[in-house]
Image (cartoon, rainbow, N blue to C red):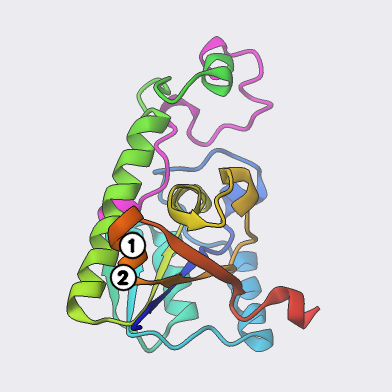
Amino acid sequence: MKSYTVYLFRHGLTKGNLNAQYIGHTDYPLSTFGIEELKKIRTKHNYPEVETVFVSPLKRAVQSADIMFPKNNKVVIDNLIEYNFGEFEECTAEDLKDNEDFKAWLHGDMYTRVPFGESNAEFVQRVCKAFEQIVNGCVSTGTQSFAIVAHAGVIMTILSCYGLPEAPMAHWQMDAGYGFKLRITPSLWMQSNKLEVVDTAPESMMKDE
Protein backbone atom coordinates (compact mmCIF):
# COMPACT_ATOMS: atom_id res chain seq x y z
CA MET A 1 0.00 0.00 0.00
CA LYS A 2 1.31 3.42 -0.96
CA SER A 3 2.32 5.60 1.98
CA TYR A 4 3.68 9.11 2.41
CA THR A 5 6.45 10.42 4.63
CA VAL A 6 6.36 13.79 6.35
CA TYR A 7 9.08 15.30 8.54
CA LEU A 8 8.38 17.95 11.16
CA PHE A 9 11.34 20.09 12.21
CA ARG A 10 11.65 22.82 14.79
CA HIS A 11 13.55 25.94 13.69
CA GLY A 12 16.92 26.94 15.14
CA LEU A 13 17.44 29.16 18.16
CA THR A 14 16.84 32.91 18.29
CA LYS A 15 17.88 35.51 20.84
CA GLY A 16 14.38 35.22 22.28
CA ASN A 17 14.73 31.47 22.81
CA LEU A 18 18.06 31.92 24.53
CA ASN A 19 16.52 34.57 26.81
CA ALA A 20 13.52 32.33 27.65
CA GLN A 21 11.08 34.90 26.24
CA TYR A 22 7.64 34.22 24.85
CA ILE A 23 8.25 34.72 21.14
CA GLY A 24 5.30 34.08 18.87
CA HIS A 25 4.58 36.44 15.99
CA THR A 26 7.62 38.63 16.75
CA ASP A 27 9.84 38.07 13.71
CA TYR A 28 13.21 37.30 15.28
CA PRO A 29 15.90 35.94 12.93
CA LEU A 30 18.12 33.08 13.98
CA SER A 31 20.89 34.05 16.36
CA THR A 32 24.50 33.49 15.37
CA PHE A 33 24.55 30.66 17.90
CA GLY A 34 21.37 29.20 16.39
CA ILE A 35 22.86 29.22 12.90
CA GLU A 36 26.04 27.52 14.09
CA GLU A 37 24.05 24.88 15.97
CA LEU A 38 22.05 23.98 12.86
CA LYS A 39 25.26 23.68 10.86
CA LYS A 40 26.67 21.39 13.54
CA ILE A 41 23.59 19.17 13.30
CA ARG A 42 24.12 18.93 9.54
CA THR A 43 27.67 17.66 10.12
CA LYS A 44 26.37 14.91 12.41
CA HIS A 45 23.11 13.99 10.67
CA ASN A 46 21.74 14.01 7.17
CA TYR A 47 18.52 15.93 6.81
CA PRO A 48 16.28 13.83 4.54
CA GLU A 49 15.81 14.36 0.85
CA VAL A 50 12.22 15.46 0.25
CA GLU A 51 10.17 16.66 -2.68
CA THR A 52 8.63 19.71 -1.02
CA VAL A 53 9.34 21.89 2.03
CA PHE A 54 6.58 23.86 3.73
CA VAL A 55 7.56 26.62 6.13
CA SER A 56 6.18 29.19 8.56
CA PRO A 57 6.43 32.76 7.23
CA LEU A 58 8.70 33.90 10.08
CA LYS A 59 12.41 34.51 9.45
CA ARG A 60 13.61 31.96 11.98
CA ALA A 61 11.73 29.18 10.20
CA VAL A 62 12.64 30.26 6.66
CA GLN A 63 16.31 30.65 7.57
CA SER A 64 16.32 27.23 9.25
CA ALA A 65 14.68 25.60 6.24
CA ASP A 66 17.34 27.12 3.99
CA ILE A 67 20.06 25.52 6.11
CA MET A 68 18.28 22.15 6.44
CA PHE A 69 17.08 21.93 2.84
CA PRO A 70 19.30 24.17 0.70
CA LYS A 71 18.29 22.50 -2.57
CA ASN A 72 14.52 22.82 -2.11
CA ASN A 73 12.26 25.75 -2.88
CA LYS A 74 10.18 26.68 0.16
CA VAL A 75 6.39 26.98 0.22
CA VAL A 76 5.32 29.52 2.86
CA ILE A 77 2.13 28.64 4.74
CA ASP A 78 0.90 31.61 6.78
CA ASN A 79 -1.13 29.51 9.23
CA LEU A 80 2.01 27.67 10.36
CA ILE A 81 3.04 30.83 12.24
CA GLU A 82 3.69 30.39 15.96
CA TYR A 83 1.18 31.21 18.71
CA ASN A 84 0.22 34.88 19.04
CA PHE A 85 1.24 35.77 22.60
CA GLY A 86 -0.26 39.27 22.38
CA GLU A 87 0.73 41.36 25.41
CA PHE A 88 3.04 38.58 26.57
CA GLU A 89 5.28 38.80 23.48
CA GLU A 90 8.98 39.18 24.33
CA CYS A 91 8.29 38.76 28.06
CA THR A 92 9.60 36.00 30.29
CA ALA A 93 7.62 34.06 32.86
CA GLU A 94 9.51 35.99 35.51
CA ASP A 95 8.41 39.29 33.94
CA LEU A 96 4.79 38.15 34.07
CA LYS A 97 4.67 36.36 37.41
CA ASP A 98 2.47 39.04 39.01
CA ASN A 99 0.29 39.64 35.93
CA GLU A 100 -3.29 38.48 36.59
CA ASP A 101 -4.00 37.90 32.89
CA PHE A 102 -0.93 35.69 32.68
CA LYS A 103 -2.03 33.67 35.71
CA ALA A 104 -5.48 33.20 34.19
CA TRP A 105 -3.97 32.12 30.88
CA LEU A 106 -1.68 29.57 32.53
CA HIS A 107 -4.59 28.00 34.42
CA GLY A 108 -7.33 28.66 31.87
CA ASP A 109 -9.13 26.39 29.48
CA MET A 110 -8.83 26.17 25.69
CA TYR A 111 -10.85 29.34 25.23
CA THR A 112 -8.89 31.61 27.55
CA ARG A 113 -7.47 34.37 25.38
CA VAL A 114 -4.16 36.16 25.73
CA PRO A 115 -4.79 39.95 25.80
CA PHE A 116 -4.46 41.11 22.17
CA GLY A 117 -3.40 37.58 21.24
CA GLU A 118 -5.23 34.35 20.51
CA SER A 119 -6.80 31.56 22.50
CA ASN A 120 -5.48 28.02 22.58
CA ALA A 121 -8.57 26.91 20.67
CA GLU A 122 -7.96 29.44 17.88
CA PHE A 123 -4.33 28.36 17.64
CA VAL A 124 -5.19 24.67 17.40
CA GLN A 125 -7.91 25.34 14.83
CA ARG A 126 -5.67 27.27 12.43
CA VAL A 127 -2.69 24.93 12.78
CA CYS A 128 -4.85 21.87 12.15
CA LYS A 129 -6.50 23.52 9.15
CA ALA A 130 -3.09 24.27 7.65
CA PHE A 131 -1.74 20.77 8.32
CA GLU A 132 -4.78 19.02 6.83
CA GLN A 133 -4.55 21.19 3.72
CA ILE A 134 -0.86 20.31 3.33
CA VAL A 135 -1.41 16.57 3.78
CA ASN A 136 -4.48 16.40 1.55
CA GLY A 137 -2.70 18.41 -1.13
CA CYS A 138 0.38 16.16 -1.06
CA VAL A 139 -1.70 12.97 -1.13
CA SER A 140 -3.81 14.24 -4.03
CA THR A 141 -0.71 15.19 -6.05
CA GLY A 142 1.25 12.07 -5.16
CA THR A 143 3.97 14.00 -3.32
CA GLN A 144 5.36 11.13 -1.28
CA SER A 145 7.92 12.92 0.89
CA PHE A 146 7.73 16.42 2.31
CA ALA A 147 8.90 18.41 5.30
CA ILE A 148 7.47 21.15 7.49
CA VAL A 149 9.82 23.58 9.24
CA ALA A 150 7.95 25.49 11.90
CA HIS A 151 7.75 26.19 15.62
CA ALA A 152 7.70 23.99 18.72
CA GLY A 153 4.11 24.92 19.54
CA VAL A 154 2.96 24.20 16.00
CA ILE A 155 4.70 20.82 15.84
CA MET A 156 3.53 19.69 19.27
CA THR A 157 -0.03 20.67 18.35
CA ILE A 158 0.09 18.65 15.13
CA LEU A 159 1.46 15.58 16.89
CA SER A 160 -0.96 15.75 19.82
CA CYS A 161 -3.92 16.02 17.41
CA TYR A 162 -2.92 13.53 14.72
CA GLY A 163 -0.05 11.37 15.96
CA LEU A 164 -0.08 7.68 16.81
CA PRO A 165 0.74 6.72 19.49
CA GLU A 166 -1.58 9.30 20.99
CA ALA A 167 0.12 11.51 23.57
CA PRO A 168 -0.31 15.00 25.08
CA MET A 169 1.57 18.00 23.72
CA ALA A 170 4.30 17.87 26.36
CA HIS A 171 5.31 14.39 25.16
CA TRP A 172 6.33 15.80 21.78
CA GLN A 173 8.93 18.34 22.88
CA MET A 174 12.01 18.54 20.66
CA ASP A 175 15.30 20.40 20.54
CA ALA A 176 15.92 23.15 18.01
CA GLY A 177 16.81 21.71 14.62
CA TYR A 178 15.29 18.32 15.39
CA GLY A 179 11.86 16.79 14.98
CA PHE A 180 9.97 13.69 13.94
CA LYS A 181 9.43 11.38 10.98
CA LEU A 182 5.81 10.41 10.31
CA ARG A 183 4.17 7.90 7.98
CA ILE A 184 0.84 8.70 6.37
CA THR A 185 -1.26 5.77 5.19
CA PRO A 186 -4.10 7.15 3.03
CA SER A 187 -6.74 4.74 4.38
CA LEU A 188 -5.91 5.57 8.01
CA TRP A 189 -5.77 9.28 7.23
CA MET A 190 -9.13 9.27 5.45
CA GLN A 191 -10.82 7.19 8.13
CA SER A 192 -9.57 8.91 11.26
CA ASN A 193 -7.14 11.74 10.39
CA LYS A 194 -4.33 9.88 12.13
CA LEU A 195 -0.73 9.17 11.14
CA GLU A 196 2.10 7.13 12.61
CA VAL A 197 5.10 8.71 14.34
CA VAL A 198 7.87 6.31 13.33
CA ASP A 199 11.12 7.96 14.43
CA THR A 200 12.91 11.08 15.50
CA ALA A 201 14.64 13.13 12.80
CA PRO A 202 17.08 13.78 11.26
CA GLU A 203 17.85 10.07 11.54
CA SER A 204 17.32 8.58 14.97
CA MET A 205 18.98 10.55 17.74
CA MET A 206 18.71 7.48 19.96
CA LYS A 207 20.71 5.38 17.50
CA ASP A 208 23.42 8.03 17.16
CA GLU A 209 24.11 8.45 20.85
Q: Is residue 193 magenta?
A: no
Quick one: 5 or 66, which is closer to the camera?
5
Residue type, label 1: Trp
Amino acid residing under circle 2:
Pro
Residue 204 locus on image (x, y percent): 67, 78
Q: Is residue 185 left or right of residue 64?
A: left
| Quadrant hosting residue 55 | bottom left
Residue indicated by mark 2: 186
Query: Label 1: which residue?
Result: 189
What secondary structure predominates along the stretch shown in magenta?
A: loop
Mark 2–mark 1 CB contact (< 8 Å): yes
- The quadrant in which the N terminus is found is bottom left
Residue positioned most to the top: 100
Side of 14 where 81 appears, left or right: left
Marks 2 and 1, how far apart at CA: 5 Å
Magenta region: which residues? 78-102
Q: Is residue 191 left or right of residue 105?
A: left
Q: In the rendering, at what x and y percent does residue 192 appear?
A: 35, 54
Camera-nearest residue between 193 and 38: 193
Quick one: label 1, few (<14), some, or many (20+) residues within 10 Å?
some
Judge the density around disc 2: few (<14), some (14-19), many (≥20) Cα neighbours within 10 Å. Answer: some
